[in-house]
Every structure is written in C-alpha cells, then in structure tokens.
Image (cartoon, rainbow, N blue to C red):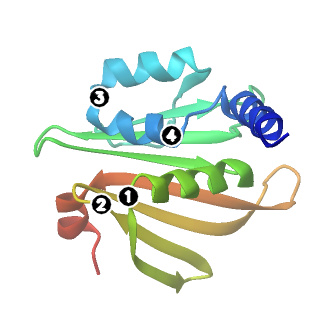
Amino acid sequence: MKLLVTLILSIYSTISFSQNLTFEEFIGLRKKNLADVEESLSMKGWSLYTDENSTNDDLVIFAYRRNDYNKHADSFLSYYNYENNNSKRVHIQIRNKQIYSNYIARLKINGFKLIKNALKDNEIEKVYQNTKTTVSIVVSDEINDSTLKPFTNYGFSVMSNNEYELNFKD
C-alpha cells in the first residue's frame, strides 16, 4: 500500500512539474553558456522575453507560459552572463507554492545550509550555501496589475559563493 501511494505521488509530482524546471535543472543553468540555456528552456516551453526598458547587455530573460496580450507569465527566468569577470548567475520568479516547496526540499536534500534569514521591507530573505554555490531566496506579496488580486512571489537567485561574498553579502 505504501508503495502504491509513493508511486502515485511520484507520478503526480512528475506531471505537475514536467513543464517547468526541477531545482537541479535550474541551478545547473548557471554553468551553461547562453545557447545551451536557450535550447534547454525552449525544449521545456520557455520563450525569450524582451524587455524594451532593459539596457543590460549581460542579461537575458525568459518567460514560461507567457500571456500574449500582456507581459504576465507563470514564471520568469533571468540569465546573467558577465563576460568581463567570467561570472554567471540565474534568477527565477515563480508564483506556485508547490514548486517553491519542492525547491526548498531539494535545496536541503542537496546539502545547502541556511546561513541568513531576515525580514526586510515586508519581504522574507533567506540565503543558503553549500561548498561552492549560494542560493538567495526572497518571498514577497505583490498585486497583479490586471486583476488587482494579491499573490505571493518566490524569487530564487543562484550564484557562486565568491560572487555572493563580493556583491551581495551585507
């Protein structure tokens, strides 16, 4: 009976997250070049998102399940590739609490330890590290511009420990 329940939950989990990125796929994007990132995301239903206000040549944004009539999407992924210092960082914004919970569970299973947590400007900030990688998480409440309904936004940024120490540590 336990095996059957485990199998059903496993299948449900796979179906639920199959069109989006697993935590391991997400953190692995930081080690890929832009062409590989674009191909990986395209195969999973992500599309290039152009922000006409962006002036950052080191940043490429992708959207998942983007609405063609406005600039809304289920998720956004930013890929930063700073060629001048050979540094790469990825950031994902998600609105799905199940995916957030799954990412947190996978983070802990992969050996990341909480090194910081804080409440700042009504946002919860948590920072996890392992021996080489830092994952910064920001949880915030926002208002949907179209519906004016509140939603929770979960942001995950992945970078090297060195980049965190140099650019983000308080």
70 or 154, nearer to the observer: 154
Q: CA distance from mark 3 to mark 2?
A: 19 Å
Q: Earlier in the sequence, mark 2 or mark 1?
A: 1
Q: Is residue 17 above or below residue 105?
A: above
Q: Secondary structure at mark 2?
A: loop
Q: Say which residue label 3 marks.
A: 32
Q: Earlier in the sequence, mark 3 or mark 2?
A: 3
Q: CA distance from mark 2 to mark 4?
A: 22 Å
Amino acid on which the number 3 mark rests in the picture: Lys
Residue 77 is labelled as 4
Q: Earlier in the sequence, mark 4 or mark 1?
A: 4
The location of residue 48, given as percent across then percent down, is 52, 25
Please give the name of the residue rendered at 58% of the width and 24% of the height, measured from the top-left corner. 46
| CB contact under 8 Å: marks 1 and 3 | no
- Residue depth check, mark 4 versus mark 1: number of the one nearer the observer: 1
Q: Is residue 105 above or below residue 116?
A: above
- Residue depth check, mark 4 versus mark 3: number of the one nearer the observer: 3
- Determine the residue located farthest toward the front in the rendered image: 1
